[in-house]
Image (cartoon, helix red, strand yellow):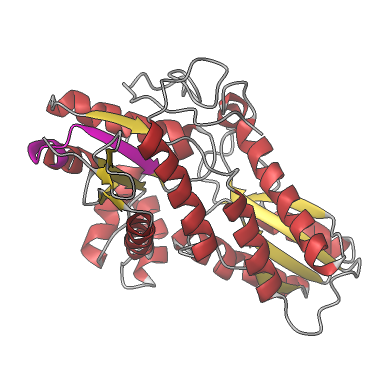
Amino acid sequence: MITAVDTSTGTTLKYDAVLLLGFGGPEGEEEVLPFLERVTAGRGIPTERLREVGQHYFTLGGVSPINAQNRALLAALQAALEAEGFGIETVLANRNSPPFVTDVVADLASRGHRRVLAVATAAYSGYSSCRQYREDLGLALASSGVDLEVRKLPSFYDLPGFAGTITELVLAALPAGLDLAADSTRLVFTTHSVPTSAARAAGPQGDAYVDQHRRVAGKVAEGIRAATGIYKPWDLVYQSRSGPPSVPWLEPDVNDALTQLATDGVSTVVLVPIGFLSDHMEVIWDLDTQATQTAAELGIQLVRTPTVGTHPGFVDGLAGRIAEELRTGSPDPVPGQRCFGGCCANPRSNAPVVPGLAIDPLP
């Protein structure tokens, strides 16, 4: 049996490993279609449509940026935890590509690990951004039958270092000479669209997905005002919709929003992808390709800011949240707290889940 220690105090930590959970992505052209088939399993999407979507990956040689980005985040988190005195193993597992969650869970158990803290590469509450990762873990434990306890860190959108890092990146991306105060300059935040039913079900009381994004956007806008003296009105828009037209998803789409802003006389849009931790395929394709083309056609100057990635302000904040849980080992939450057994449920899924945690109350 493995134990992990806080070397600054000599005390044993409440967990013996940290498991970073990623979405996954192909690492070569031969992996693109199998990857997309795993992502869309059970949805009845024709192979021809998958090949069409696969072209996004083929333009990058079939290699998704997300895996390297998550490996970099894993290394940065491990370094930050080591700097705080934590001697604990950190590993990566993916939902849709190697290393798969089931394989990593089995390996951890076989090497003597017994209590693992899981951290998803998604900052917000919701089915696909939180509960589905708990399902991945629940299914892996159920299928393998290993002796392993896994708890998942809750959404971390509220980390001061998250909104603070985004603010810093926005300010650094503003081109010289831009009149930020002008009505013709607009601040637009974007995130992944989800079905409206999933958005309503997110969080203990529902509607957390949209509310949490609006909180982050508001904090960034306030941070910009604190730094520049200018408060910019802002919009929250959505991207990467993948569902059939008959199913309502969160709107407006970023391209529709740009069209409306151009009609309203906006000539510069500062586009801030607050819904993503790294510049992976959906950011590259939906924003740097499609939205950029839309803006060019409309005569809009588009300033796209980077995602938080491995920025020290974000990494240190997340590592601090992880460290807090490693030291204390929060009790299981109950309904009404940040995360609980039935939170963010998908009515089409009855998969087993590992517990989420409630480190602190909603701000």
In the shown orientation, is residue 148 left or right of residue 284?
left
Q: Which residue is most to the top?
A: 335
Q: Is residue 334 above or below residue 301?
A: above
Is 323 magenta? The answer is no
Residue at 48%, 57% (x, y): give it.
Answer: 316
Residue 103 lies in what quarter of the image? top left
Q: Quadrant of the N terminus?
A: top left
Across the whole image, how many numbered discs are drawn on residues? 0
Question: Closer to the camera, 112 or 33?
Answer: 112
Question: Closer to the camera, 140 or 63?
Answer: 140
In the shown orientation, is residue 140 left or right of residue 285?
left
Residue 32 lies in what quarter of the image? bottom left
Q: Is residue 217 above or below residue 306?
A: above
Q: Which residue is most to the left?
A: 110
Residue at 63%, 70% (x, y): give it.
Answer: 292
Taking the image as drawn, is residue 238 in sight? yes
In the shown orientation, is residue 40 left or right of residue 110?
right
- Magenta part of the protein: which range? 108-119
Residue 163, horizontal then vertical, whole percent? 64, 54
Taking the image as drawn, is residue 277 in sight? no
Residue 208, horizontal then vertical, whole percent? 62, 31
